[in-house]
């Protein structure tokens, strides 16, 4: 394997040529993927991220608005056993996280699951995976940005007693004219990203520390109102209710794969990427379980049903003061900004990898030599996501991000198994334990979660996939670097 601290060899390995239908299954060798690492049009990405910063990127993308509002949906389904539901969801995510950790340490490149699929299952599957990631990252950035205005208004109201008018906090069709805060938070994230990966990582680390501190503060205050009697009937709705709540809570874990998109900007990717992925999942799971346990201990679980239950409401009830809710709103504002920053970062790096392979226009692969960032890529993606969030009602398209994510996770689990059989002697800095068992379980859990989604989500996903296939056959298949033999 290529040493990540050295320059690529003078003669890079090449992929076998394929034509006709076989072109759909042409694979890009792992050695070639690694050798190209960091190289873009006009410059190179810079290896500047430590394991701590990689971990913060994953936490920043995962620990978002979900925990601030998800209890109102999950507690009525599981009661006090919602803590077990979080553990169940965390275990579901763990199987896929293990697969990501193995592949991130073996193929430390910017494309995440797109690149892993390219090396194991061929170009067409890689394109489908990349197209899913565009849906996951792009639409989720817009969806998260939409909610930023609500928390910003809550913060403004609690501090200076004013709020932004409804016409400027929602898109047409949702009661407004233009969601200005959504556009602003995306543009702020763009400014940080244009400054460089290291600078963006520093800003994200500060925001992650603030939102973790906000959740720890909630636990400290909520514990003052803790009543052990709230746990006297731990599982009032039965065992099946834990699984139902866990299926909803699984989506609170989406984002832990963000560190894998930084494979070409990590200082020591083979060592640090697997550690960052696993450490972020452990930290996020521990926080989720702790917050859920304190919330149910402070409030009888029946109060969550049919109410506007939130962490801020619990803090206000325990203390009898609105100040704490306002403080938590400030934490939510920072939390959402962190999610927008890290997910937008992941989106640009995936497009960077796809551009380098020729599957999307070269503009997305141009690197600014001064900052070491894909500047044009970042501006285009940011403006697209900002306008999408500000002017378009997302509706069911938001739900489709979940199915796209699960599909990508499922492919990563398959990729681990394929690579184990096709290249058993490949150097791996981390290996999923118990052979193919855990990747198979990861695939089955993802499949079950996809099956549980409603029909309209499948329809939206099907339409998105159909559009993606048209784009691939009309553009990507012919311009692929493997097709043109361009080196």
Image: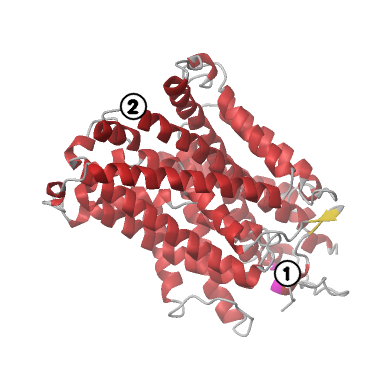
Residue 61 higher or lower than 15, as above or below: above
Overall secondary structure of the magenta stretch? loop
Q: Give x and y (percent) for residue 145.
A: 54, 34
Residue 78 higher or lower than 2, as above or below: above
The picture quadrant where one finds residue 25 is bottom right
| Secondary element at tag 2 | loop
Nearest to the observer: residue 393 or residue 55: 55
Task: Note whether residue 381 is visible.
Answer: no
Mark 1 vs mark 2, foreground winner is 2
Q: Identify the residue under disc 1.
A: 34
| Secondary element at tag 1 | helix
Q: Give x and y (percent) for residue 400.
A: 48, 43
Where, quadrant-wise, is the C terminus in this rendering? bottom right
Q: Residue at x 38, y 53 (%)?
A: 287
- Residue interval drawn in magenta: 26-30
Q: Give x and y (percent) for residue 388.
A: 60, 30
Q: Identify the residue under disc 2.
A: 322
Where, quadrant-wise, is the N terminus in this rendering? bottom right
């Amino acid at each position: 394997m290529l040493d990540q601290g050295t320059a690529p060899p003078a003669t890079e390995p090449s992929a076998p040529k394929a034509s006709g239908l076989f072109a759909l299954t042409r694979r890009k060798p792992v050695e070639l993927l690694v050798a190209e690492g960091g190289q873009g049009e006009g410059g190179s990405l810079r290896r500047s991220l430590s394991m701590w910063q990689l971990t913060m990127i994953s936490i920043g993308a995962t620990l978002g608005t979900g925990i601030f509002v998800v209890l109102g949906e999950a507690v009525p389904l599981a009661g006090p056993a919602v803590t077990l539901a979080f553990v169940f969801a965390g275990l579901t995510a763990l199987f896929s996280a293990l697969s990501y950790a193995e592949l991130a340490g073996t193929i430390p490149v910017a494309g995440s699951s797109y690149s892993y699929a390219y090396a194991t299952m061929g170009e067409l599957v890689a394109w489908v995976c990349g197209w899913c990631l565009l849906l996951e990252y792009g639409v989720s950035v817009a969806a998260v940005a939409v909610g930023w205005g609500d928390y910003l208004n809550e913060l403004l109201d609690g501090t200076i007693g004013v709020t932004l008018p409804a016409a400027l906090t929602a898109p047409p069709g949702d009661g407004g004219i233009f969601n200005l805060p959504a556009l602003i938070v995306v543009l702020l994230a763009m400014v940080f990203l244009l400054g460089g990966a290291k600078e963006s990582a520093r800003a994200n680390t500060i925001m992650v520390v603030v939102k973790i501190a906000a959740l720890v503060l909630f636990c400290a205050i909520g514990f003052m109102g803790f009543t052990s009697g709230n746990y006297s009937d731990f599982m009032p709705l039965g065992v099946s209710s834990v699984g139902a709540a866990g299926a909803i809570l699984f989506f609170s874990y989406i984002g832990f794969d963000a560190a894998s998109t930084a494979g070409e900007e990590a200082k020591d990717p083979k060592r640090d990427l697997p550690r960052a992925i696993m450490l972020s999942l452990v930290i996020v799971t521990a926080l989720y379980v702790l917050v859920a346990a304190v919330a149910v201990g402070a409030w009888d679980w029946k109060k969550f049903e049919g109410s506007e239950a939130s962490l801020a409401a619990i803090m206000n009830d325990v203390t009898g003061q609105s100040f704490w809710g306002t403080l938590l709103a400030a934490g939510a504002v920072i939390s959402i900004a962190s999610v927008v920053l890290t997910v937008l970062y992941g989106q640009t790096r995936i497009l960077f990898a796809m551009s380098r392979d020729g599957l999307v226009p070269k503009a997305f692969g141009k690197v600014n030599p001064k900052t070491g960032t894909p500047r044009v890529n970042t501006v285009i993606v940011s403006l697209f996501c900002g306008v999408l969030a500000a002017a378009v009602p997302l509706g069911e398209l938001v739900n489709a991000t979940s199915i796209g994510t699960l599909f990508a996770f499922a492919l990563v689990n398959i990729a681990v198994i394929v690579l184990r059989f096709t290249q058993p002697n490949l150097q791996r800095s981390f290996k999923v334990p118990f052979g193919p068992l855990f990747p198979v379980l990861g695939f089955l859990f993802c499949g079950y979660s996809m099956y549980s989604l409603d029909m309209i989500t499948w329809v939206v996903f099907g339409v998105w996939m159909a559009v993606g296939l048209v784009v691939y056959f009309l553009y990507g298949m012919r311009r692929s670097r493997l097709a043109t033999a361009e080196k």
